[in-house]
Image: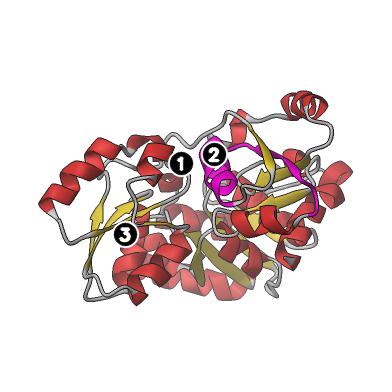
Amino acid sequence: MPDLAAKINDLRRRRDAVILSHNYQLPEIQDIADHVGDSLELARVSSRVSHRVIVFCGVHFMAETAKLFNPEKTVLMPDRHAGCPMANMIYPEKLQQEMKLHPQAAVVTYINSTAEIKAQSDICCTSANGVKIAGRIPEKEILFIPDKYLGSFVQRRVPDKTFHLYDGYCPTHMLFSAEGIRQLKEKYPAAQVLVHPECRVEVQDSADAICSTSQMIDFSRQSPASQFIICTEIGMLYRLKKEVPGKEFIPGNPHALCPNMKLTTLEKVFWTLEDMKYEVVVDPAFRDRALLPLRRMLEI
């Protein structure tokens, strides 16, 4: 859609806007974006944006994070219905109950969470840095929310600490199975298996490497292997093929699609720049408290 892309570029310049895209977005969205990345990469970019307007092509908690870093800027989402089921699995009252059960535990919160949850947390983490965060904080007891599978991955790599894992998960990453990987390995015996830590433990145990999406790029680039079975949302395969040409990337499950990530289209990006909607707002009552665990994460 070259005409539409040209119109977006014109509006982007006139609005002084930057377009950020998560790795799971549609290929045409990744192509139009100024920055493409995982949650950690986009959090870093968001924390130092100079543009007046941020168009966030992802899900709501990601755009909310960008707004936390940039309260004076306009943050827009092309589709206001693009939410995250995992983030919705934890809510403030439930977190308070968990904190009462484990009063000595530091609350380590996956960035896949709402600002209101972040405001009650000690520090945030992503799939790329969860192990480092858990290992570096002084507390010996950790309440890890909301993803029990990422929490389990971190727990196994930080064995000297006590973990309490909240019962949340990503529905898309539940679509991968150890049996499915076994069948793919029969078909592609030389392929290395790269698994996102949001996958179930038995899927993680089938992996050659457990990686965040950004780490998948680095691993496949450095590996001598020429084939990789990728166990994360299928949008990631587009970025892998672009950034690591000459190697083959096989979906661990071709149906592992996040419907919320796929709500954003080029037309919606154009409309959001044209109409300057839908704007993301964070309640100032907890904005500063929600920003603190994010800043702590980036400092580490």
**Residue 133 position (above or below residue 36):** above
Verify whether residue 178 appears in magenta: no
Residue at image position (33%, 39%) is 176
> Residue 227: x, y in percent?
21, 64
Amino acid type for the residue under numbered disc 3: Leu
Q: Mark 1 points at which residue?
A: 260
Disc 2 + disc 1, Cβ < 8 Å:
yes
- In the displayed structure, does residue 148 sit left or right of residue 207? right
In the rendered image, which residue does mark 2 sit on? Answer: 84
Q: Nearer the viewer, residue 271 or 260?
A: 260
Q: Residue 28: x and y, percent?
A: 36, 62
From the viewer's side, name the closer residue of 235 and 194.
194
Residue 121: numbered disc: none
Q: What element carries label 3?
A: helix
The amino acid marked with disc number 2 is Cys
**Residue range (magenta):** 138-157
Residue at 61% x, 54% y: name it. Answer: 130
Spatial separation of the CA atoms under disc 3 and disc 2: 20 Å
Q: Say few, some or many: other residues with alpha carbon within 10 Å of mark 1 (under 14 / 14 to 19 / 20 or more).
A: some
In the visual, does 194 lie left or right of 285? left
Pick whichever, 230 or 12, lies toward us: 230
Asked if residue 155 lies in the magenta stretch, the reply is yes
Q: How far apart are marks 2 and 1 (CA)?
A: 7 Å
Callout 1: SS: loop
Asked whether residue 277 appears in the rendered view, the answer is: no
